[in-house]
Image: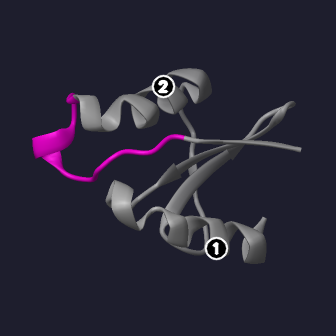
Amino acid sequence: MLYIIGLGNPGKIYEFTRHNVGKLFVLYLGESNFLPGEGDFFYKETEYGFLIIPNLYMNESGKVLNDLKKNL
């Protein structure tokens, strides 16, 4: 199973900055219809694996890995 995690920062101030390149790429791959996970992330299941978008600042995104282990 493949997990692609698009790191970024929440909020309008970071929306189209270099801080959100990973997040924007995963949104591009998934196009739309991301579901809220049981934690601070959104996900979409594809034929290859999961696309993950943390809803945390980049330096806090490690917490999402713990949520993923519990919920996906």
Q: Amino acid at mark 1?
A: Asp
Q: Is residue 37 left or right of residue 59?
A: right
Position in image of residue 41 (x %, y %): 52, 61
Q: Residue furthest left?
A: 13
- For the point 54% across and 55% down, which residue is it? 42
Q: Quadrant of residue 50?
A: top right
Amino acid type, callout 2:
Phe
Q: Secondary structure at mark 2?
A: helix
Q: Nearer the viewer, residue 33 or 42?
A: 42
**In the image, what residue occupies the spot 29% across and 50% down?**
9
- The kind of secondary structure the magenta stretch mainly shows is loop
Q: What's the CA distance linking mark 2 and mark 1?
A: 22 Å
Q: What is the magenta range?
A: 6-17
Give neighbour class at mark 1: few <14, some 14-19, many 20+ (Cα, 10 Å).
some
Q: Which residue is mark 2?
A: 25
Number of numbered discs overlaid on the protein picture: 2
Q: Which mark is residue 43?
A: none
Question: Decide: marks 2, 1 in contact (CB < 8 A)?
Answer: no
Helix, strand or loop status at disc 1: helix
Can you tell which quarter of the image residue 44 is in?
A: top right
- In the rendered image, residue 3 lying in the magenta stretch gets the answer no
Q: Position of residue 17 (x, y in %)?
A: 20, 30
User: Residue 24 at x, y = what percent?
Assistant: 41, 29
Q: Which residue is mark 1?
A: 67
